[in-house]
Image: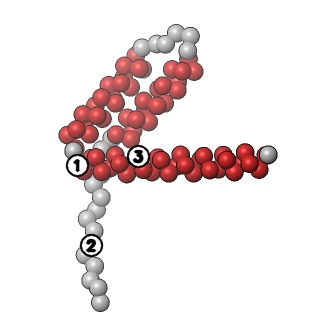
Amino acid sequence: MVEEVRTSRRDLIARVATLELLIADLIDLLWQLDPDGMAELARIASRDLDIQTTHTITGAEHQRERLHNVLQERQRKLRPRRAPAPRKATVKV
């Protein structure tokens, strides 16, 4: 039973990590396709975080912290990234 829980937990961690990588790739692709739209999403994410920070949720401090973490992560992921360096041409011999 304990071994099943460990395996299940490892599987869950691997799945979450895979989803995070897929989301990061999708965000990078969207920045390439529509930089203006992604900049707008980044502004919205920043505004949402500012609104959440300035308003208090009474009696739900644990939820406030959780929401803050989610909004902060969203803002971080939507920040523009540096463009990747151009690939060098390779010559096949």
> Mark 1 Cα within 10 Å, few/some/many (few <14, many 20+)?
few
Q: Which element type, helix, strand or loop, lies under badge 2?
A: loop
- Give the residue number, with chain letter if any, for mark 3: 23
The x, y position of residue 31, in whole percent, is 27, 47
Q: Which element type, helix, strand or loop, lies under badge 1?
A: helix
Q: Which of marks 1 and 2 is nearer the N terminus?
A: 1
Mark 3: amino acid: Ile
The x, y position of residue 45, in whole percent, is 34, 30
Q: Which of marks 3 and 1 is nearer the N terminus?
A: 3
The x, y position of residue 76, in whole percent, is 39, 38
Whole-angstrom CA distance, mark 1 to mark 2, is 22 Å
- Give the residue number, with chain letter if any, for mark 1: 33
Mark 1: amino acid: Leu
Which image quarter is the C terminus in?
A: bottom left
Q: Which of marks 3 and 2 is nearer the N terminus?
A: 3
Left or right of 46, for residue 70: right
